[in-house]
Image (spheres, rainbow, N blue to C red):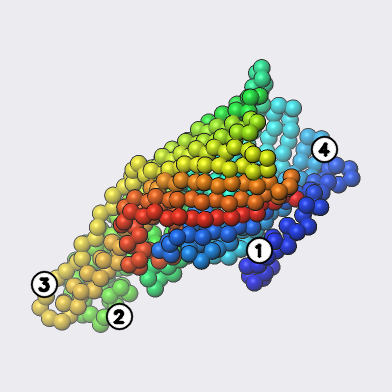
Amino acid sequence: MSEKKLRRLPLAAAALVTCMSAQADYQSPDGNFRLSGFGTLGAVHSSTNDVYVNYPGQGGGAGTTPSTTPDSKLALQGTYKFTPTISATSQVMLRYTADSEYYPSVDWAFAKWQAMPALSFRAGRMGAPFFMVSDFRNVGYANIPIRPPLDVYGLVPTDQFEGADATYQYNLGSTTFNFNLWGGESIADYRSAINKGATALPPSTFELKKQHGINISAEMDNGLTLRAGYSKAKFNLSSTSISSLYSAATCLGAAAQFGVNTCPLYSSYGLTNTAGMQTAAAGMAAQTIASTDVLATNGKNISFVDFGFTYDQDAWVVSGEYTKRRSSGFIADTTAWYGLVGYRVAKFTPYVGLSKISVNSANIAPGSVTPGSVAVVDVNTGTFNAVSQGIAANINSSVQSLMDVQKLSQRTITLGTRWDISSSLALKFQWDQIHKPADSWGMFFTKDPSTTQAQSFLTSRRKVNVLSASMDFVF
């Protein structure tokens, strides 16, 4: 599929909606194969262009010009039963990605064995069960608000994993308990900026290795469901910014050992090498390595705890979650929560929500690089000192930018309404007011964090109003 066609997703989704009410999910005559789908056609408008509103990780978002990219998506899901107890499921979704384009991805591809009525096993690629609504977080029609509260659901950049799980169901009186054990690996591209000055910043790759977790839920016949979950993993972040710091350290190390002209950071200035320059470069190399090693993420521990509930009885719909993320690397420790209350009036469900994310600890404090210098006796040594100051400033700026990405604190007030037009189509309208403290990016996307406009946003308190509308459908 060409890029031009991929960028037409909102138009394609709109066309699909016109006929989908007559196209219920398909089931083969023998009942072994079922095909269904879902999608969202959404538009988002923000009160600022200093930063952009998106689903965290996407390579773009909405400013004062409305955008369809944060929420619009289209998905197909198929399940085939080989036997009464063995089946396979696949889900393909088209949505806006970290590469700043619509691109299809295989979100689910797993086999399931229903070993007993109460016990099942799955293996393959599945939805990662970090949250209360993990399995249907992307199905807009299945949720009351336009999108799950990003103050909570934006904390984990991946919504799928490759591995296996086991689920056991136990009935006790009028309560059904579900016990789920899971493990595997996850990988996702993530983007927090497009460029920094003249330097392009491609998406970073976030990996979770040796994941394992447990989830326990209790479904009661009065409409209340309680859930608790815990997961732990080793994580790695492959980032151009971190790689460039290692490259700078290697370059400075070469300058220290073999002379400054062996390092491209110095070689274009026509310097005449001296022992003093090599000594100064050695000091900068050591400081750069020390800072970069602190930022390195290979094999660091990360854990996630989630407590949640839903209540859906008669006209009332209430939900909430409380989460804690802990890390031994530079990924910040956070506490996040949300609460949402809706009330059904005929085909309309007005709702109100409140959510908040707080950064508890940045975990690390990288040191700064002091510019190497030598006694100025001529133009040659003066140039070396000036170049060294520029190198140190760039390294320190890169380190600070990486640390700033973890400044996520914000709180959000949400008001909205859902209109169920039919059993497969819903319209939603939502207003979010996001309050961001000083020295925080919040959950916003920044095209270029080095601009004066962006830095002003980072360092000051801001209030951003976001208006969203969506058409959610299933077929």
Amino acid type of disc 4? Thr
Q: Position of residue 384 (x, y in %)?
A: 20, 75
Extreme residue in the front direction: 345
For the residues labelled 4 and 2, say whether their Cβ atoms are less than 8 Å apart. Answer: no
Amino acid type of disc 1? Leu
Residue to which mark 2 is pinned: 268
> What is the C-alpha distance between the residues marked 3 and 1?
62 Å
Q: Is residue 141 left or right of residue 233?
A: right
Residue 92 sits in quarter: bottom right
Residue to which mark 3 is pinned: 375
Give the residue at x 32% y 67%: 452
Give the residue at x 48% y 39%: 338
> What is the C-alpha distance between the residues marked 4 and 1?
36 Å
> Mark 4 against mark 1, which lies toward the viewer?
1
Extreme residue in the right direction: 29
> What is the C-alpha distance between the residues marked 4 and 2?
69 Å
Name the N-terminal-most of marks 2 and 1: 1
Q: Is residue 163 above or below residue 459?
A: above
Q: Nearer the viewer, residue 349 or 360?
A: 349
SS at badge 2:
loop
Extreme residue in the top direction: 173
SS at badge 1:
helix
Q: Is residue 226 left or right of residue 290?
A: right
Q: Residue 9's mark?
A: 1
> What is the C-alpha distance between the residues marked 2 and 1?
47 Å
SS at badge 3:
loop
Amino acid type of disc 3? Ala
